[in-house]
Image (spheres, helix red, strand yellow):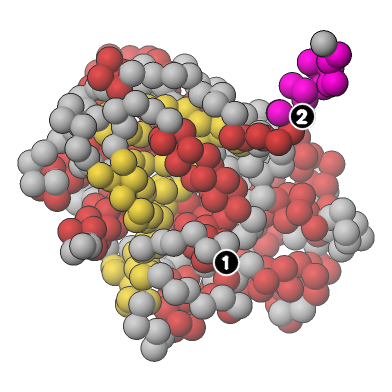
Amino acid sequence: MKRMFPVGGMILVVLLVLGCALPTEPRVSLSDSAIPVDRYLDGLDSLGAPSARALVPALPKVTGGSFDPAVLEAYLAAITGTMRSAFLALASGTEYPVVCLPVSCEGQSGLMWVPYDPAGVLEAPVVCFQHGTQVYRDCAPSRFDPAVSSVLGSPDVAGAFQNYVECTVGALMASTGCVVVMPDYPGFGLSTEPHPYVHQSLGESVRKVYKRSLRVLAGIAGAPSFNGRTYLIGYSEGGFATLAAARVFQKTNVPVTAAVPCAGSYDLCGTMVDQIRDYAVVKVPYYIPYTVFGYASVYAEDDPEDWDYARLLVPPLPGALDEMFSGGHSGAELTAALAPFGYMPWAMLTPALRAELAAGTGPVYRKLRANTLFLSWTPEMVLQMIHCPADDIVPAANAQAAYEAWEGLPNVLPPLWVPPVELPPGLPEIPGLGDTHLLAFPTAMIAGFGFIHGLEAFQP
């Protein structure tokens, strides 16, 4: 019989047609792989134990500096104690063991937490949980390793700790009976692309990993059936990515029951520009050059002169920027590299860019405005923003500005204001700049996931 098509050619066609629908993730048995969420909480607790401090005497924070042992204990207790109790109450005392699955699609990756119901009758919503700012490529959900040595031995201990915390929170969410999808952004996990920091294209990257996760879920024997309801939640850059994802899901007709962006920089052309214009010293100074790098990665191909690093940043930053944000350096390394600027973002900008931002003109300002999503998009899903009023990294004015732009829409609720984690007596209320943003993560997640569970409970 004459072969009409070479076998190799046929395989290539199949690959091109199926694309990221190919089952690249490992096949698993939920019953054999499910682990009680306590195991992950124990790992998180152990990061505050004396044995961990013997290896890393002062656990660094992503906001700079190191944790005071008492502050670290309070922070961990807010997750392993308070959050766990709150989530257990939401689930009426039912706590499912969970399975951790990697997912990948078109060069992007992510992590999916799947609850295991031995009875096989669970119908679950999907919660898409977007992570906060990272700079080291392997500090990504898909790279989660439950061994605490993965944190203590990481080249970016602070970023690895944040990733461990966020992934453990994802496991906690899943233990209540939700499927939790945690996308890696471009530039993290499998992706070697530049990371488009706080850019609206993050929404599309979330959508890709979400759609892939649904296909993987449908192919797992014994997995919960998807009940058709999707929720979005995230903190810090994850708050921005949540809003960006809500916009993309809406535009592509993917139903979203509710979006819960927390502590995000939604007002890029207003609140965030105002924050850097007063020569203030900041704890995370690399946010500004990170934004330049991320936006240039999106816009420089079409407008190379507008996004020439030398037009935007003072020396030696133009020659160093690509290496700084290559995914191979820790946040601590980047912060140290910016010490000559006195940790003042405004001092990193050229006079030309300062003048443009001050006047609200120029290509950079126009792109910041284009990515201030509440100026050009009207959400149709329920939207509940959450923020700490005292946030000292991402000002609460971001949430207020977005709400005022959408005020009058019945589906956009007033911002929910949450406090940071309560610290032990005898410690300063705010131990250091940046701690409020960090310490408000557990309280925001408790409030945000509680809101999601409340909506889910009233669904038909």
Residue pointed to by mark 2: 13
Q: Name the residue under label 1.
A: 251
Q: Measured along the vertical axis of the image, is residue 322 above or below residue 310? A: above
Q: In which image quadrant can residue 233 be found? A: bottom left
| Vertical comparison of 264 with 88: above or below | below
**Which quadrant of the structure image shows residue 57?**
top left
Residue visible at 44% across and 74% down in the picture: 380
Q: Name the quadrant of the C terminus.
A: bottom left
What crowding class fits label 2: few (fewer than 14 Cα within 10 Å), some (14-19), or many (20 or more)? few
x and y, in percent, of residue 308 in the image:
87, 55
Q: Is residue 234 above or below residue 246?
A: above
From the viewer's perspective, tell me whether residue 137 is left or right of residue 294: left
Q: Is mark 2 on a helix, strand or loop?
A: helix
User: Quick one: which residue is furthest to the front in this view?
Assistant: 1
Task: Work out which quarter of the rendered image holds the N terminus and state it.
Answer: top right
**Which of 282 and 214 lies nearest the eye of the viewer?**
214
Earlier sequence position, callout 2 versus callout 1 = 2
Based on the displayed image, in which of its 4 quarters is residue 416 positioned?
A: bottom left
Q: Which residue is drawn at 44% across and 62% down?
A: 255
**Amino acid type of the residue tagged 1 in the rendering:** Lys
Q: How many labels does the image show?
A: 2
Could you tell me if residue 239 is visible in this image? yes
Look at the numbered discs 2 and 1 and tell me whether their residues touch, using CB distance below 8 Å: no
Name the outermost residue toward the left.
93
Q: Where is residue 209 in the image (x, y as percent from the top left)?
A: 53, 42
Residue 94: horizontal and vertical position, in percent? 11, 39
Magenta highlight range = 2-15
The image's mark for residue 356 is: none
Which residue is rendered at x = 47% and y = 52% of the image?
A: 238
